[in-house]
Image (cartoon, rainbow, N blue to C red):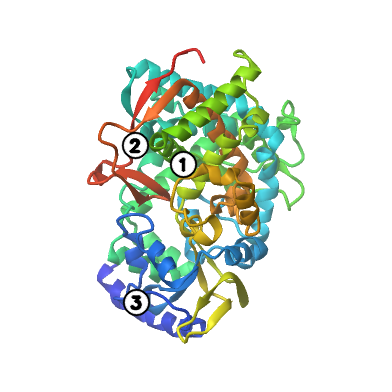
Amino acid sequence: MNITLLLPLSAIVFLLASLLRRRRSLKYIQGPPVSSWLLGHEYELANQAEVGDLEFKWFRDYGTVFRSAGCCGEDILMVSDAEALHHILNTGGYRYPKTKDAVRFIRQISGRGLTWAQGVVHQRHKKALSPAFSESQLRLLLPLFQMYSDKLALRWRERFADNQIIDISHWLPKVTLDVLGESSFDFQFGSLDDKASDLRVALQTMFASSQRPSKFTTLLRSWKRALPDSIVEWFEAVYVTEEDIRFKAYVDAAKGAARDLLDKNASNLSANGEKISEESHDYLKGVEGKKDMLNMLLRSKAAEDPRKRLDDDEVLSQVSTMIFAGFEITACTLTWIIYELSRNLEDQQMLRAEIDAVREKRGDDAGLTSNDYDSMPFLNACIKEGLRLHPGVQFTTREADLDDVVPLSQPVVSTSGEVLKKIPVMKGQRVHIAIAAYNRSPSVWGPDADQWKPSRYLDSASESKKQQSMIGVFGNVARFAHSMSLCSWRFAVIEMQAILVCLLTQFEFQLPPGGLDIQTVPLRSMNAPMLRGKLDQGLQMPLVVKRRGRADD
């Protein structure tokens, strides 16, 4: 296909789409000026030097809700208001599904898994997988989390001298990937052992050039958004980008690994993916009562109840979805938490003292339990504050499935000067959920919302205020307020507890001489730490790591 035809074709599509969008106009809501009708604010937002440079300022200028411009005159509702988010993400349920282009993108990068599913399909996926994330099941996995945490500490002792600079952003994804592989799918990535893996390579390279989309890419994505799925699928089959090739390589590798795992654990699952016989469940013998992810997938594939059954591709897609969504963001959050503890040494000392006290009470030879972790208020306050101040993702986008009225906890002023306490939205309206902006909202977190302050979670009065606008299930942060997160939040929290306790027991962390100039860069799906002026070197968090006295702890 002649690519030069894309621009005139897209112009025609955009013109028609913009005419249709007029009935969803938000012109009465204030918003920042637009320098380009063609690109709106989409290109600017995707190419910010640092996460939040634009939207944080805009929310300060216009309030917790404002109008942003999409490509070709589309109005997008930008939201960080607590009550509005609660309505959209929680009360609204499936009335605000993911946008069509987001669903396509998720399917492209991870298949038809839980994050792709919506409505009744999402309910079916969630019903099949929820037992794998139950508290009782996760308690059984805790020794595995602790084992890999100890293995990370051992690798540091083997490869680095005491009081040496270690780039922790390089090492933490290794441990979280190894934990996820073995705990969920009985698959050993061997990242901490530098084991070669086609799947790991595909995962690490899938977003190699996706950090800064060009103007053409921004327009192309918007053009696809305006077209039916059948036309987009035809176009993508004709015009294949390097990015498309990398995404396919990861999904193929993940599904291939998933098929090998299922073959190994189910004798009647054939190598070409034939359906498990529903008449014979002999392959389930010996796994009665097991509720890890792998066995839940086997059971869901053979379920006689269609409300719980997953088809072949859905089963394989759960593996690629969990791997993609389940390790890198957790590692990034841990990186930010340890960075903040390195900048705030009093907090690090306070946390270490809390850990040491619990260990002393339990006895040197007794392993810590999940109850022990939950009994450490400052540990959990630091995790919550890390999730709040440095959320794994900056935003998510939804689309109204019906005409609705969105309530506001903080009224905003319209372009005519009217005070708005509610925002009417029409079916098809795109809504930008500003996770990072909500997590720094002074109306929820106080005037010090931009500062690291884990003690805010130990203040009962402050906690009571946040409970009134509860968004997420852990610490009221928006990180755990949607889709996959609602199933896996407890997994991520216990994993972070185990890794932090292990590392802070054995090491002390400090900033390098001269400090660090860290820039928060939107990378892949994360808010990634990089060194200012060295963005071409990728993720970096070099910290001085000093061994503590007892190497056997």
Q: Position of residue 448 (x, y in %)?
A: 47, 53
What residue is drawn where x is 34% and y is 75%?
10
User: In the image shown, does 272 or 184 lie closer to the viewer?
Assistant: 184
Q: Which mark is residue 441?
A: none
State how far apart marks 2 and 3 are (Cα). Answer: 36 Å
5 relative to 248, above or below: below
Looking at numbered disc 3 in the image, what kind of residue is underneath it? Answer: Pro
Q: Is residue 396 left or right of residue 465?
A: left
* Labels 3 and 1 touching (C-beta < 8 A): no
Q: Position of residue 531 (x, y in %)?
A: 28, 43
Quadrant of the image occupied by residue 241:
bottom left
Quadrant housing the N terminus? bottom left
State how far apart marks 3 and 1 are (Cα). Answer: 34 Å
* Callout 3: SS: loop
State how far apart marks 2 and 1 are (Cα). Answer: 12 Å
What residue is drawn where x is 54% and y is 22%?
147
Quadrant of the image occupied by residue 328:
top left
* Callout 1: SS: helix
Q: Which residue is mark 3?
A: 33
Sequence-wise, the earlier of marks 2 and 3 is 3
Looking at numbered disc 2 in the image, what kind of residue is underneath it? Answer: Met
Q: Residue furthest bottom?
A: 416
Q: Which residue is mark 2?
A: 541
User: In the image shown, does 408 or 313 lie closer to the viewer?
Assistant: 408
Q: Which mark is residue 333?
A: 1
Looking at numbered disc 1 in the image, what kind of residue is underneath it? Answer: Thr
